[in-house]
């Protein structure tokens, strides 16, 4: 049919019962409803389903804070996805993500000089690292920049909520 479309559904039950089930029938050529017959559709194509997890940030009276669930590997995995790194398992420790020659190290707590030194020591000669931690102790950013040119330190959530997270609204001409 040459169609492309996007839909959103808040209830997982609706996706499982109706949306995904119907799309599977259409792709498999087993859907007798809709315009399938009139277009001569015999199946093919496919679809992609994305499940969005709850935000790892919460707005509190003290400001934006990491949610209670965002600990251990869940926080690291969410950060890897948010920053565009390919997720890696624990066997790659202290790293949890890779993007080209850039590695990702995520700490649930604070990063100090000792942690930064260990992370940098685990890099190969041409690799760099992005270190993300909930607390960045004094002197760490300077140390990392000095010891591994091109490497950086980010504080969560402050440095993760800027830059690429801009919202863009598109409207048709003449619509206000």
Image (cartoon, helix red, strand yellow):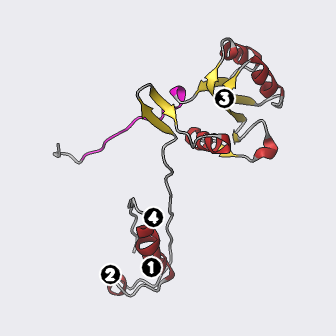
How far separated are the C-alphas under marks 2 and 4?
Answer: 23 Å
Q: Is residue 161 left or right of residue 151?
A: left
Contact between marks 4 and 1 (CB within 8 A): the answer is: no
Q: Is residue 160 magenta?
A: yes
Neighbour class for label 2 at 10 Å: few (<14), some, many (≥20)? Answer: few
* Residue 165 x/y as whole percent: 45, 35
Marks 3 and 2 sit apart, C-alpha to C-alpha, by 53 Å
Viewed as shown, does residue 50 lie left or right of 153?
A: left
Do the residues bearing badges 1 and 2 touch, measured as CB atoms within 8 Å?
yes
Magenta region, residue range = 158-171
> Considering the numbered disc 1 on the image, is that residue within a helix, a strand or a loop?
helix
The reply to whether dot 2 and dot 4 touch (C-beta < 8 Å) is no
Instruction: State the residue position of label 1.
Output: 26
Query: Residue 29 in the image: x percent, y percent?
Result: 47, 84
Q: Is residue 62 left or right of residue 94?
A: left
Q: Residue 153 appears in which quarter of the rendering?
A: top right
The label on residue 109 is 3
Circle number at residue 34: 2
The answer to whether residue 162 is visible is no
Percent x, y for residue 134?
61, 28
4 or 1: tag closer to the N-terminus: 4
Residue identifier under label 4:
12
């Amino acid at each position: 049919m040459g169609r492309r479309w996007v839909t959103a559904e808040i209830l997982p039950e609706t996706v499982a019962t109706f949306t995904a089930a119907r799309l599977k029938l259409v792709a498999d050529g087993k859907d007798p409803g809709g315009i399938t017959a009139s277009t001569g559709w015999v199946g093919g194509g496919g679809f992609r389903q994305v499940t969005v997890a709850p935000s790892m940030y919460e707005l509190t009276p003290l400001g934006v804070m990491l949610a209670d669930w965002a600990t251990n590997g869940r926080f690291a995995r969410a950060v890897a996805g948010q920053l565009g790194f390919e997720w890696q398992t624990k066997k790659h420790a202290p790293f949890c993500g890779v993007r080209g020659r850039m590695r990702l190290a995520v700490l649930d707590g604070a990063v100090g000089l000792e942690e930064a030194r260990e992370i940098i020591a685990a890099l190969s000669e041409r690799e760099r690292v992005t270190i993300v931690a909930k607390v960045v102790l004094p002197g760490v950013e300077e140390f990392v920049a000095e010891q591994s040119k091109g490497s950086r330190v980010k504080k969560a959530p402050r440095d993760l909520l800027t830059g690429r997270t801009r919202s863009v609204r598109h409207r048709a001409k003449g619509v206000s």
